[in-house]
Image: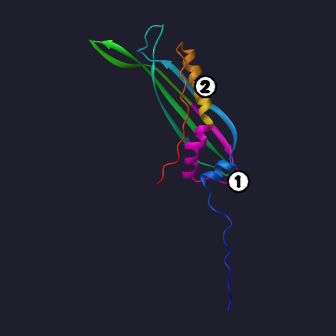
């Protein structure tokens, strides 16, 4: 009678905490930066903007030993303009910036897409935030506006499935 011994796999699946502990930020690069007035821009002077902004993250397909996080912020500055006896909000400034962050992983580890996305939405965004914030602040200042400062980034616990 032969007996077979099954070896337990020494490889376990990675958790987000594992990736956060093992990842090394290798490079941060501004990939896109744009700021412009729209056709509705008022003449130069004091302009009081109400900023609306959105944040988006994503990842390139992970490869052994590294992965890339993309973090983008879109900003629209609106003013209230009175016409025909009513006030309307009109967008006068549009700006966006996209940063790419390249991370290294030891032992040629490859992340699955879901784990890479979780990392991008938490740690990746947290790492990119100061760069995104400075880029939009400087871009709006260069347009002659009161510089826009992104608020503090507050990450909550991941949503439970």
Q: Is residue 46 magenta?
A: no
Residue at x-position 45% and y-position 7%? 43
* Image side of residue 105 versus residue 90, left or right: right
Q: Which residue is mark 2?
A: 134
- Compared with residue 47, is residue 119 higher up or lower down, i.e. above or below? below
Q: Give the residues drawn in magenta, as a range.
A: 98-126
Residue at x-position 52% and y-position 48%? 158
Q: Is residue 116 magenta?
A: yes
Quarter of the view holding residue 57: top right
Helix, strand or loop at mark 1 = helix
* Image side of residue 49 versus residue 68, left or right: left
Residue furthest to the left in view is 84
Give how far across and how far down residue 160 sits, in percent.
Answer: 48, 52
Helix, strand or loop at mark 2 = helix
Q: Where, quadrant-wise, is the N terminus in this rendering?
A: bottom right
Give how far across and how far down residue 97 sits, in percent.
Answer: 56, 29
Q: Earlier in the sequence, mark 2 or mark 1?
A: 1
Q: Is 47 or 104 nearer to us in this picture?
A: 47
Real-space CA distance between mark 2 and mark 1, rounded to the nearest whole angstrom:
33 Å
Give how far across and how far down residue 63 sits, in percent.
Answer: 64, 50
Residue at x-position 38% and y-position 19%? 90
Q: Is residue 59 visible?
A: no
- Compared with residue 112, is residue 50 higher up or lower down, i.e. above or below? above
Q: Which mark is residue 108?
A: 1
Residue furthest to the bottom in view is 1
Quarter of the view holding residue 6: bottom right
Mark 2 crowd level (few <14, some 14–19, many ≥20, 10 Å Cα) = some
* Image side of residue 81 versus residue 15, left or right: left
Give how far across and how far down residue 31 sits, in percent.
Answer: 60, 31
Q: Is residue 8 visible?
A: yes
Q: Which mark is residue 29?
A: none
């Amino acid at each position: 009678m032969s007996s077979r011994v099954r070896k337990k796999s020494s490889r376990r699946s990675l958790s987000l905490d594992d990736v956060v502990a093992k990842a090394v930020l290798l490079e941060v690069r501004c990939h896109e930066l744009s700021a412009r007035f729209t056709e509705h821009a008022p003449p130069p002077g004091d302009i009081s903007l109400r900023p609306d902004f959105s944040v988006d993250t994503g990842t390139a397909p992970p490869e052994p030993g590294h992965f890339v996080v993309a973090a983008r912020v879109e900003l629209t500055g609106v003013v209230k303009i009175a016409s025909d006896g009513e006030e309307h909000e009109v967008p006068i400034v549009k700006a966006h910036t996209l940063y790419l962050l390249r991370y290294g992983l030891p032992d040629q580890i490859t992340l699955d897409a879901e784990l890479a996305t979780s990392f991008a939405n938490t740690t990746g965004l947290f790492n990119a935030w100061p760069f995104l914030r400075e880029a939009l602040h400087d871009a709006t200042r260069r347009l002659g506006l009161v510089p826009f400062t992104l608020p503090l980034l507050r990450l909550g616990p991941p949503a439970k499935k």
